[in-house]
Amino acid sequence: MKARIYCPSKSVTQSGSRGSDKWVLEYEPAGQKAVETLMGWTGTKDALQQVKLSFPSQDEAEAYAKRKGIDYDVKPQQSRRVRFQAYADNFK
């Protein structure tokens, strides 16, 4: 059972940064998805793929994983490059 801990980026469709300060622990898939023969649906028997736990900080997410004995990988938080541009700069 392996998990990854990361800080999700802000939503592309919104200008705000709501929810981008939380850290998420989610389990990596244990097996491949299979196509169900009768209906043709894609599914898996791994219920942990549906679990996403959120934490206020990276340290708390790591502490949880250590306490539960979960192997984990931490993906560093990516910084956002903000570029200020005036509307008039489009016509230079």
Image (cartoon, rainbow, N blue to C red):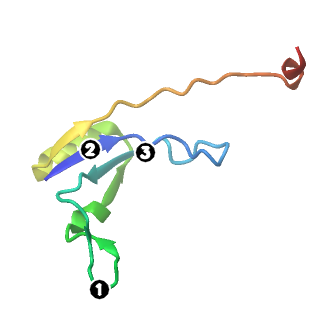
- Image disc number at residue 4: 2
Report the number of numbered marks.
3
| Foreground pick, 64 / 46 | 46
* Furthest residue in direction left, as rendered: 69
Residue type indicated by callout 1: Leu
Residue 64 visible somewhere in the drawing: no
Q: Earlier in the sequence, mark 2 or mark 3?
A: 2
Q: Is residue 77 above or below residue 83?
A: below
Q: Secondary structure at mark 2?
A: strand
Q: Secondary structure at mark 3?
A: loop
* Front position among marks 1 and 3: 1
- Quadrant of the frame with the C terminus: top right
Residue type indicated by callout 2: Arg
| Foreground pick, 31 / 10 | 31
Q: Which residue is mark 3?
A: 22
Question: Are there few (<14), some (14-19), or many (20+) residues within 10 Å of tag 3?
Answer: some
The residue at 83%/22% (across/down) is 86
Q: Earlier in the sequence, mark 1 or mark 2?
A: 2
Residue type indicated by callout 3: Lys
Marks 1 and 3, how far apart in space?
40 Å
Q: Quadrant of residue 29?
A: bottom left
